[in-house]
């Protein structure tokens, strides 16, 4: 997690107890990193100090995915907890910009009332990224 325009950054996560990772800013950016986070649901609290009137937060999550014997991957991510907006998805050096739309903008073609349009967007992007990775492999072999 990066806080751009901050003096410092504190990220607190509650497992059994509150655990805190803190960082002082360097050149106006404070960065906190944590590897090997166990799966689960956590309460997260973010705070810090800033000299200016606004701070940009950049949250990056990375996950390793196993590939099958022919090098293919498949991954689905439930985006219901993510607010609508513009995001970047990066896979194997390929970056795609996606827009997550609010669920009320679903078309009547949606099969399930539980499905979020952002899941459809990510699914389509995932297929495109997989296609581009496969095409890239063909060009570099």
Image (spheres, helix red, strand yellow):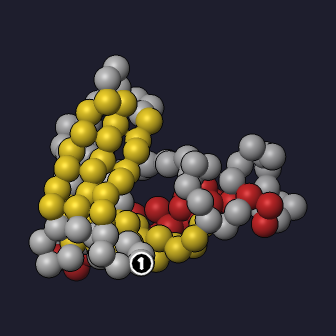
Observer-nearest of 45 and 60 = 45
Q: Residue furthest top?
A: 16
> Measured along the vertical axis of the image, is residue 68 above or below residue 8?
above
Residue 91 in the image: state x and y as whole percent: 31, 64
Q: Residue furthest front?
A: 51
For image coordinates 32% across by 41% down, the residue present is 12
Residue 118 in the image: state x and y as whole percent: 62, 60
Residue 18 in the image: state x and y as whole percent: 31, 30
Asked if residue 138 can be seen in this view, the reply is: no
Report which residue position mark 1 lands on: 53
Q: Secondary structure at mark 1?
A: loop
For image coordinates 44% across by 36% down, the residue present is 43
Observer-nearest of 15 and 90 = 15
Residue 3 in the image: state x and y as whole percent: 30, 66
Q: Residues within 10 Å of mark 1 (few under 14, many from 20)?
A: few
Q: In the image, 123: left or right of 53?
A: right
For image coordinates 79% across by 56% down, the residue present is 110
Observer-nearest of 109 and 47 = 47
The quadrant in which residue 34 appears is: top left
């Amino acid at each position: 997690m990066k806080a751009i325009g901050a003096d410092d950054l504190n990220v607190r996560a509650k497992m059994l107890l509150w655990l805190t990772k803190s960082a002082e800013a360097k050149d106006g950016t404070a960065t906190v990193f944590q590897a090997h986070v166990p799966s689960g649901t956590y309460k997260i609290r973010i705070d810090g100090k800033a000299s200016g009137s606004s701070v940009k937060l950049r949250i990056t999550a990375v996950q390793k995915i196993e590939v099958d014997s022919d090098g293919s991957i498949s991954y689905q991510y439930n985006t219901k907890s993510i607010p609508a907006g513009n995001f970047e998805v990066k896979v194997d050096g390929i970056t795609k910009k996606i827009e997550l739309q609010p669920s009320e903008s679903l078309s009547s073609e949606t099969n399930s009332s539980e499905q979020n349009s952002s899941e459809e967007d990510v699914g389509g992007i995932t297929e495109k990224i997989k296609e581009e990775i496969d095409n890239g492999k063909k060009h570099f072999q």
